[in-house]
Structures are given as structure tokens and as C-alpha cells.
Image (cartoon, coloured by chain):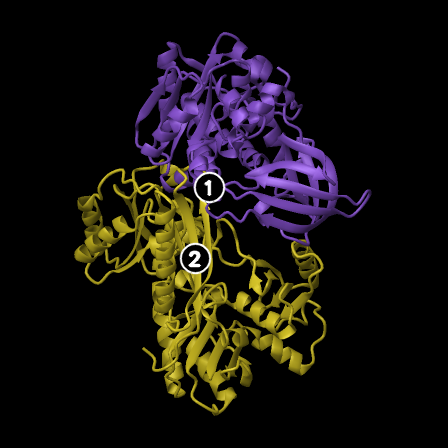
Amino acid sequence: MRLAIDVGGAHTAAVLTDRTGRVRAEAVSDSAPGIGTCVRRVLASLGPLPAAPDTVAVVTDLDRRRYAAPPLAVVRIAPDAHPALAPLADWPAAARDRIRALTATVAGGSALTGRAPGPLDEEALAAFAARAHRAGVSVFALCAAGAPARPGPELAAATVVARTAPGAAVSLSYEIGSPGLRERENATALNAALGAWADTLVADCRAALRSAGVTAPLFFARDDGGLVVAEYFRRHPVLGTSPATACAARGAAARTGHERAVVVDAGAREVRCLVLREGEPERTAGPVPGPFGVRVALGSPVVVRGALSGETVGTLTSRLLARVPGAPVVHTGGGGDVIGAPPADPAERTARLTDAARHAATARCQVELDEVISSAGRAELDQLLDAARGHALSRCVAAGADPATVRVDSLLQSPVAYLPAGVHRVTVRAAGQPLGGADR
Amino acid sequence: MTGTPTDGPGRPGSLTPDHLRRLAAGARVLSAGTEESAFRVTLDWAAAELDAHGPVPLLPAHELPGAGLCVAVTLAGATAALAEQLPTGEEPVRAVRAVERLRGRAAEAIVPLNTAVENTLIAIATAARCGLPLVDGDGCGRVLPLLEQTLFALAGHSPAPLALATPGGDVVTVESAHGRVEDLVRPLLLACGGWGVVAAYAWPGADLARGLVAGTVGRAVAAGADEGEPAFAVYRPRRLCRGRIVAVEQSAGAYGHLDPAAASGDDAGLPSRPTSVLVDEDEGLRRRIRLEAHNEILLALADGALLASVPDQILILSAADRRVLDVERAVPGMVVEIAVVEADVRWHTARGRALARAGHGAPAARDEGRSL
């Protein structure tokens, strides 16, 4: 049995599926401000479960509630750059107001070819970390130039920070972002800033589930609709700040049998549309505004947002249909009446409200790995690609997948333009079934 | 001076931050595959230089300082490396100053080497920092990957004396290269982290004018004039056909780029895999169109007959919004238009064609290109 709970702005939906993915029980209740209340309420509506679930998955968006981020320290490990390109220089003013951050650039890092321009300036780093520590900052984001090729400088810097600011939470960019220093640095800073949000979310969900007697391992949905286990989510919260639409879209695709579609998710406050191909949401290829409007390149689904009106939806869908000519428009979410979606009988209405939870109840753990590798020849390239596959698989296990089921879904490898023939960007996606059993 | 684009009536007298935003949008119309992170770096950098040093005068091609030294500026190396090791902002000035020392005189204008959006933006940053005007034009009229692939070279000018300035603060000068500029500069780029700013083709305006494609900077500004919807028409595309993509085929050779021959040749740094796109015309003669691409679309055939080929720029446009599609984003089922933007006439001479092909590893062309 797998349980999934989708906590939205207006509604909370819960779905229990059996081993084959068949729905055994489902419920929809009104949402409350606190996520714990939402979880308790929907579990009460669901009634006594036929069996204890093996896993629980939660789908919820960051913007459901206002979040006050703790102060942050952002360290760029790289040679000095133009002041206009300094850490956080490209953040919108509103984001800088909401996330107060001390920033520093210390010498170190490497080029994409792996060559190091100079050693890590440990002294400068320790001085900055001490200053941040004294100022009461206990959340650090470290981003080194060249980290996708050489994570070493970031790991060395993390040691310095841990020594100087004991107990600090440290986010490292090589675990989070792709090549492109500024976007990776932004994603790492956001990741650090969101740690407290994830901690609270995990604790609240856990407490509510325990109070209902559910102790199965807890998973959270990522923006692309994949799952990660709670401990992994707490370390990588930036991967799962707006999973609701992708989950709803994938659930709707499975419900209607349309693997290729434009999905319209009518929520409580706005409408969100995306394109599905082969059941997967279309992903962004470059930097886009992420949480707090900060530009990141996380390859998250392309979600087009608009006001809740029939006219807006018409414009959005016709624009998206141009990308998947002839594809059907599939409706999900609770706000269909407002936008003039095809009328829904009560069963259809419940189905639309439970799409996201139904998807999460059958979803796999998913992770990706973005690396830059340099090889002298074919044999070494093969070795490095094997190593990248291995990293992705172990990362997937760390994300809560059953080791017996993890596999590499895709490996994209492309030479980096205008670097020597052996320098490749590698993107690996791995997935596996969430591991059930006792919660960790 | 015979460039296709000319000094239009809408050409600004100087470039302000507002023009910069338009230019950035307009210059990307034809280059769907721009590396986004690097593009943003160069845009923010150029905008900061304009903020700090004021607008850059945009010099119409016919006002080029005849005897005054003009210097072409370009990014050399990998945009992915630029996005990782960010510029300090000193690189272009150092490169220009080094070339000035070699030439023994001060530069009077900066000219972008080609129309790649990063190169135009870096040329603007350079002009702002050096307090010089930017020439409204470039040495290519389009984008080609190698330093020697310019109409300046075709007009008989050597890129040397040339200076490469790296983000690490190094400056390397090449005084005479005898056709080996690319071979000399590439290893230097690797030694310095993958990218640098090159100042080259430092020649008097009157000489450089023979290789200039005039008006390309103003054209990019015009193309980006409308907020959100870049005006593709500014580039005067010629429509070849309209139809539906029926297949996208990629060469299976995952290791093709690691073949010793390719690794040592001019092909070494070219990014994408050879790809064929098949389009069934849905009107008129209902021909089967075949596009052959490697980094860019090299060839368009209609039922086996030649429709267009490089050095002209062949583009796949989404029929819905007439935006240029990256070849990697072409998927079967899409309704598309195939259009061609003609290259400058000088690229259509025998020597021009040979030089334009140099980056694609055709041996004969490579030799001819090198002998310039």
C-alpha cells in the first residue's frame, strides 16, 4: 500500500493505492493554514486504512504559505569577477529583501577543464565564516567555479566552514546545479535558504502522520513529479518548491491515457498550464525565474501561469498547443468551473482533485546528476561515464529508492563546444521505487 | 562596402542600456542555440559598462575613421567556460591596449568580429570601457566559429597582430601567424581556463571597410525593438517551404567526436551531433525536404535537389509563432517553415565558400582557408 497526500491552497487530497497502483481509497477535504491540520483532516476523511501504508508521499508548494527565510551566508569560491556579476547581483530586489544574505568571494575553484587557477584561500574563507557565525548566521551556501568538473574545492571549503562555524548547515553547489556559475550559485543559495522550510514541513507532516498512526517512510514530490525521501528533501529543498502542477499533470495524463497533451491545472488562485510529451512535463532548457523570482537553471518543468479566467486559459492553451500540434487539452485541479472547462460530474471532479495525489502514490524516486568530465580517450571516457552512472544510482538510493530497483533512465552526453574533444557535459537521470519499511 | 544590411533610418546614434536590451533580444533571433548562462553574463556585463561609462556612440559604416585604427573584438573559446569563470571586466581593455602597443597607435573605433550575441555585447562593453565608438557593422554578417572566418580575412587582412586577454589577467600577443591563428590560440585558451577576449584585425578604417558588413548592430537593435516579439522580418528571410516534420535522425556515432582524425582536426570543438531533419511539404509541390545539420543547418534538399546551403543561414521556424527552432528542439509532428537568410555576397565567391566551410572539416576547404 502507498499513501499520497496533496496539500493545495484550497483542497487537500489523499489517495491510497495497492501494489498494482489501483486506488483503494481516496478523500478530499478543505485545506487549513497549517499543513499538519490538512494532513490530519484528510486522513480523517479517508477513514480507517485497509492496511498500513509502506510509503507516504506529500505534494505541496512553497508558495502555499509565506515563508520567512533565515539569514544566509553565500560564498563564491572563484577568482574576482566584475562587480555587476557578484553573488546575488542578479537577484530581484524583493528577493534580497526576503532573504538577507552576507556574501563573499574567496580565491579558489577550477576551470571547466578541471585546471585550478589557484589554491583555495582558506584564511579569507575562515575569516568570513567566523564573521557570519558571530552575526548569528548558521546557514551557508558554497559555490566554486568549476564544481561540476571538480567538486574538491567545495568539499575543502565545507571543512573550513564546519570548523569555523560549528553546527552550520552547508549547501554545496556541485550537488545542486548544472554548469553556469551564477545560476548554480543562485540555486545553492536558495537551497540553503529553504532548509528551515523543509525542516518544518517534514516535522509537521511527520507529527500529523504519527498522530494518525502512520509511520511509513515519508517522501516529498520534486518539481518534475518524482519523489525523494524526507531526509534527502531536507538537504535539497530547492528541487521541490512547486511540484503540484507536474504531479497533477502526470496524474491527469495517466487518468485520461493522454501521454501527449496540454494540461490545464486550475487552482485556487491561478491557472497553470504545461506540455506533456510521453507522459513527462516539458522541461526548461535554460535559466528561468525560480523561487522568490531568483534565476536558476534546474531543468524544472515549463509551467505557464495566468489569471483564473476562460479568456486567459484560451490564450495559454493555444500557445502551448503550437508545441504539441493536435494534442488534447486535459483539465485537472479544482477551479475548472471558473475557467469554463468541460463540465465535470462529481466523479470527474474528484478525479481532477486527486490527480496529483494519485500520481504521487505511484511515482518513482528520481534524481539527476550534472557533471563535466575530461577524458583523454575513449577508454577513459567510458570509465568516467560508468562512474557518472554509479554516482547517479547511489544518489538515487540516497533519495530513498530501493537499491534493488534503481536504474539509469537516461544519460545525455555532449561535448562542450570549443573545448578539447575530451571535455563532456554529462546529465544522468536515475530512478527507482521508493523503499518502504520503517521510517528513518 | 557592400553589406546586405544598410544604415537604416531607425539606427540609433548611440547605444543606451535600452538599446542594449533590444539588441540582446534582436541578435538572438537567428541564434536559437545560444548558451543562456553566458549570454546573461555578457548582457549584465555590457549593461554595467554602459551604466558606468555612458552610452556608446554607434558609428555608421560610412563614417569609419579612414586612417584611424579600428580593432575587432570577439570572445574566443567556450561560452560554457565564460559562464563558469566569470569576466573581471578588464579583459577587453587589456587586449585592445596590447594591440595598440603592437601597432604603435591608439585605437579609434571598436568593431564586433561577427554577429554572435555575446561578441556584440563584449564589443559594446569594450567600446564603453575604452571610451571609443562602436562601428555599426561586423566582419562576418553572420556567425562562423573560427577567428579567420571573416570577410576581413577574405579581403586580405591578417587577424594578427592579435592579443588574447584572459580572465586570469594574462595577455598573450601574436604578431604574425601565417594562417595559423586558430591553431596558436586554441591551446592558449585551454591553458587559461577555456575562454578569453581577442582583439584582432587592427587595421585603418579604410582598409577594414572592405571587409565590413555594414549595419548589423543597428539591425539587431531594430529586430529587438518590439518588447517580447523580435522582428524576424528585419533579417529578410526567404521562405523555402512549409510542412510537417516527419523524422529527426541523429548519427549513431556516440564517439564520433573522439575519432583521432576529428579530435585533431578543425572539428574538434564543434558541439552537436550530425542530425537530419525530414519535412513533408504540406502545400504546393508536396516535396520531401531534407535538412542536414551539424551545429547549424548545412544543407536543404527538396526531393534531392539543392534548395539552400551554407554559407546562407537555413532556419527552422515554428509555424505557430515564427520563432527559430534549435535543431535539437525539432520533433516529429511539428508544423514548421523553412527559411533562409542569405549570407553576404562575398561569402558566395569560391574563396568565400571555401573559407566558410573551414570549420566543418572539409579538407580542401580547410587548406584553402588556412592559406589566407
Residue B263 in picture, x, y percent from top left: 42, 37
Chain A as rendered: colour: yellow
Check disc 2 and report the residue beneath it.
A428
- In the figure, residue A387 lies in which quadrant? bottom left
Chain B as rendered: colour: purple
Give above or below for A225 relative to B197: below
Q: Amino acid at mark 1?
A: His
Q: Residue at x 64, y 17 (%)?
A: B2
Q: Are marks 2 and 1 in contact (CB under 8 Å)?
A: no
Q: Amino acid at mark 2?
A: Val
Give me the disc on residue B257.
Answer: 1
Viewer-proximal residue among A190 and B141? B141
Viewer-proximal residue among A180 and B251? B251
- Evaluate whether residue A32 shows in this view: yes
Q: Residues within 10 Å of mark 1 (few under 14, many from 20)?
A: many
Which mark is nearer the camera, 2 or 1? Answer: 1
Disc 2, SS: strand
Residue A100 in picture, x, y percent from top left: 34, 54
Q: Would you say A343 lies left or right of B363 here?
A: right
Q: Would you say A267 lies left or right of A419 here?
A: right
Disc 1, SS: helix
- Evaluate whether residue A418 shows in this view: no
Q: Residue at x 26, y 42 (%)?
A: A108
Q: Quadrant of the N terminus of chain B?
A: top right
Find the distance from the CA under tag 2 to the CA under tag 1.
Answer: 20 Å
Give me the disc on residue A362.
Answer: none
Q: Would you say A253 lies left or right of A175 here?
A: right
Chain containing the residue with disc 2: A
